[in-house]
Amino acid sequence: MLGKITGTILAANSNLTERLAGMVAARSFDFYAMSEDLPNPESRVTLKDGKIVLDWRRSNWIAHEQLVVELKKALRRAGFPIVLSRAFDRRTPSHQCGTARMGSDPKTSVVDTFCRSHDHKNLFIVDASVLPTSAAVNPALTIAALALRAGRHIALSEFSA
């Protein structure tokens, strides 16, 4: 459970009136079936006319759809009389990872295991871009841990001189 839908949001995303949507939302439970988008080399972040363009490609959709089918069955067995689902679409990506991947080989990665750029030794990248995937959850704590680790590495290296 990630949050609670409101009547206003439900009405805006359905054919229900706001009053009816409010009644439905007040008596509903929100469940989110989250699955991992596996790394996909066809996904890209590019610039077009000076603007950032994100083109991510779903990579695990069949498995995700099966997860939703199984969740719906479990909810019906648990006594929920009506189970509706709607996927987040490509306009709602979150926790994008992998655009500056971490690794030991400069041919397949941008930064080393301390988040230091292979090409620019005084550049450290410490955000979700260095992670190959977020395992279907918010990677904020992993990113914080990486930042602390990279910071310790910088403080103990020649950069602190």
Image (cartoon, rainbow, N blue to C red):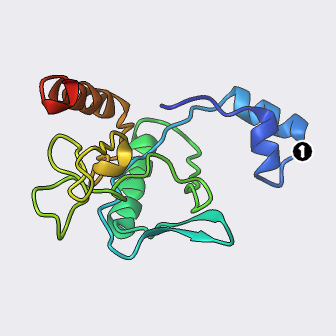
Relative height, residue 54 to residue 102 (above, below): below
Relative height, residue 129 to residue 160 (above, below): below
Residue at x 19% of width, y 23% of height:
155
* 121 sits left or right of 12 in the view: left
Residue at x 29% of width, y 52% of height:
133
Q: Quadrant of the C terminus?
A: top left
Amino acid residing under circle 1: Thr
Q: Position of residue 127 (x, y in %)?
A: 37, 41
Out of 121 and 50, give the one closest to the viewer.
Answer: 121
* 16 sits left or right of 116 in the view: right
Q: Position of residue 78 (x, y in %)?
A: 41, 36
* 51 sits left or right of 145 in the view: right
Question: Looking at the rendering, which quadrant does residue 41 occupy?
Answer: bottom left
Out of 120 and 40, give the one closest to the viewer.
Answer: 120
Out of 135 and 5, give the one closest to the viewer.
Answer: 135
Residue at x 37% of width, y 52% of height:
97
Out of 50 and 68, give the one closest to the viewer.
Answer: 50
Residue at x 25% of width, y 24% of height:
148
Q: Position of residue 129 (x, y in %)?
A: 36, 50
Residue reaching furthest bottom?
A: 42
Q: Position of residue 98 (x, y in %)?
A: 33, 57
For mark 1, what is the residue?
A: 17
What is the tally of numbered marks visible in this picture?
1
Relative height, residue 97 to residue 146 (above, below): below
Instruction: Decide: few, some or many residues near mark 1? Use Cα within 10 Å; few <14, some 14-19, many ≥20.
Output: some
